[in-house]
């Protein structure tokens, strides 16, 4: 994991590679009116310099301030959550650094500006399929399917003791709470992060984690958690269950 993190840091400082990632991502987003991706000036860009169009807007987490309406917060969080699901399950190309400053909100147009593609990573179709199975099983409370997907990804071993397996399945089921909610999930009142953290820490100290998944999952976890924390920061209500039904079909 540390070796992969080091390689990722070097990739994030390679602006030539970022241009390629940005162009590939732009193809997937297309002419979606809710998002804006600044254009790149290749004639002015080098490995160490990235020249892009200027994009106006404020950091998206500013929407949490009293100057903005709840409807704007809900809409922004909904758009970015939907984009997160599309990145994994449709694009197979994920911008894995959900730093709040990487998203600007343009109040004049209502668009969200997407910035910083240095941490963009392709996800293999096999891993995408495993996460699709994991999400579908979690939503359906299908513990056999959840276990099969977890073993395939590397979250647990095929021969782990039943007690550890059941505890891990409980944790994964808990993590999928927003996907199973009926209607809009209210991030403003959710304490899911704390519950998952404490339950996961207890499992770690009990020795339940006998295997490690592929290193690339580290960056997917960062994206999932960052998207969750942004929605929480915005105190937003998001219908994740409806989104998942569409993206996982």
Image (cartoon, helix red, strand yellow):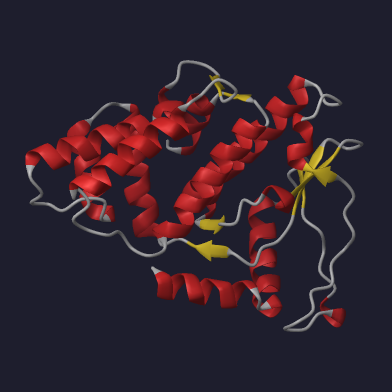
**Vertically, is 166 above or below 121?**
above
Residue 242: horizontal and vertical position, in percent? Answer: 51, 25
**Vertically, is 42 above or below 218?**
below
Q: Is residue 229 left or right of residue 112?
A: left
Quarter-wise, where is residue 109 in the image? top right
Residue 215: horizontal and vertical position, in percent? Answer: 38, 65
Between 133 and 31, the one nearer to me in the picture:
133
**Vertically, is 156 above or below 216?**
above
Quarter-wise, where is residue 9 in the image? bottom right
Quarter-wise, where is residue 110 in the image? top right
Task: Check the picture and name the quadrant holding the N terminus.
Answer: bottom left
Residue 48: horizontal and vertical position, in percent? Answer: 75, 82
What's the residue at 70%, 61% (across, down)?
A: 116
Between 169 and 180, the one nearer to me in the picture:
169
> How many numbered callouts?
0
Between 135 and 166, the one nearer to me in the picture:
166
What's the residue at 90%, 49% (across, down)?
A: 56
Judged from this view, the residue extending furthest toward the top is: 182
What's the residue at 64%, 40% (across, down)?
A: 80
Task: Check the picture and name the quadrant holding the C terminus.
Answer: top left
């Amino acid at each position: 994991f540390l070796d992969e993190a080091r390689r990722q840091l070097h990739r994030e400082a390679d602006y030539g590679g970022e241009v390629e990632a940005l162009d590939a991502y732009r193809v997937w987003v297309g002419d979606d009116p809710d998002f804006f991706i600044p254009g790149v000036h290749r004639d002015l860009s080098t490995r160490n310099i990235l020249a892009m169009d200027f994009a106006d807007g404020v950091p998206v987490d500013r929407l949490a301030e009293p100057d903005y309406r709840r409807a704007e917060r809900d809409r922004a969080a909904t758009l970015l959550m939907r984009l997160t699901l599309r990145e994994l399950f449709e694009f197979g190309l994920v911008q894995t650094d959900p730093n709040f400053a990487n998203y600007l909100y343009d109040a004049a147009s209502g668009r969200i500006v997407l910035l910083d593609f240095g941490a963009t990573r392709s996800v293999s179709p096999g891993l995408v399929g495993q996460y699709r199975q994991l999400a579908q099983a979690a939503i359906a409370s299908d513990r056999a399917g959840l276990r099969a997907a977890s073993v395939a990804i590397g979250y647990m071993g095929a021969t782990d003791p039943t007690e550890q397996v059941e505890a891990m399945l409980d944790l994964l089921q808990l993590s999928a709470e927003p996907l199973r909610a009926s209607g809009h999930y209210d991030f403003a009142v959710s304490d899911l992060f704390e519950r998952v953290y404490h339950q996961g820490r207890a499992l770690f100290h009990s020795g339940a984690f006998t295997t490690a998944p592929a290193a690339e999952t580290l960056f997917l976890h960062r994206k999932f958690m960052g998207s969750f924390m942004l929605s929480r920061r915005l105190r937003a209500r998001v219908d994740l269950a409806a989104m998942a039904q569409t993206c996982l079909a």
